[in-house]
Amino acid sequence: MPAASSISFLPLILFTVLTNAAAQIMLKKGMTGLGPLDIGADGLIGTVFRVVFNPFVFLGLSTFVISMASHLIVLSRVQLSYAYPFLSLAYVVVAAYSYFFFAEDVGLARLAGIGLIVAGTILIAQS
């Protein structure tokens, strides 16, 4: 597939990345609100219902469906070896959000890894 064709799908690819990251963030918020799971206390079925029907978890799972649908559209038009590496940018978004909003530690090694992810994705986008 010509590069121009792949580049024209970049907005949809980035939408897929952002919805994937948003889903992860919502799942984390929902699970943090639920606290540590104790299957013994609620039983397996009770725990599954408690998790799935938490509003943030439910919204996160729904957002994953949207993300996957957009990814399927991308895959129908763009080479997998071009589109798939962009999903690593979701890690960058999640790490930044986690640092600023969940007060998670992002050390030097993670920052270096994030830099490599961004650099690699830029190289792939230009190929």
Image (cartoon, rainbow, N blue to C red):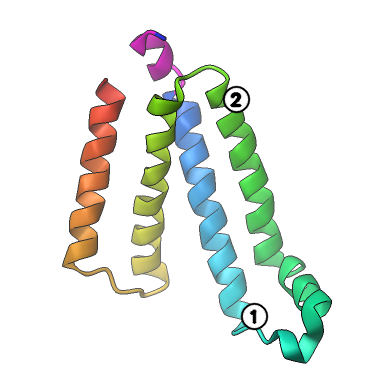
Query: Could you tell me which secondary element the residue under label 2 belongs to?
Result: helix
Q: Is residue 55 left or right of residue 114?
A: right
Return the residue at label 2: 73
Q: Note whether 125 is above or below 66 in the view shown.
A: above
- Name the residue located 46 percent from the left edge and 21 percent from the top edge: 9
Residue 99: image location, x then y, percent: 34, 67
Which one is nearer the viewer's eye here, 35 or 56?
A: 35
Give the residues in magenta. Answer: 2-9
Q: Nearer the viewer, residue 94 or 117?
A: 117
Q: What element carries label 1?
A: helix
10 Å neighbourhood of mark 1: few (<14), some, or many (≥20)?
few
Q: Where is residue 32 in the image (x, y as percent from the top left)?
A: 56, 77
Quarter holding the N terminus is top left
The part of the image, by quadrant, that contains residue 37 is: bottom right
Label at residue 34: 1
CA separation in Å, label 1 and label 2: 34 Å
Is 95 in front, or is 110?
110
From the image, give the main secondary structure of the stretch colored magenta. Answer: helix
The location of residue 96, given as percent across then percent down, is 34, 59
Does residue 102 appear left or right of residue 113 in this picture?
right
Look at 59% across and 85% down and name the residue there. 36
Q: Which of marks 1 and 2 is nearer the N terminus?
A: 1
Q: Which three-letter amino acid code belongs to the residue tagged 2?
A: Ile
The residue lying furthest to the bottom in this view is: 41
> Which disc number belongs to residue 97?
none
For the C terminus, give its image quadrant: top left
Q: Which amino acid does label 1 sit on?
A: Leu
Q: Position of residue 81 (x, y in %)?
A: 39, 27
Drawn side of residue 53 relative to residue 77, left or right: right
Q: Going by the image, does 64 lie left or right of 123?
A: right
Q: In which quarter of the image is residue 43?
A: bottom right
Task: Identify which residue is drawn at 25% across, 52% down.
Answer: 114
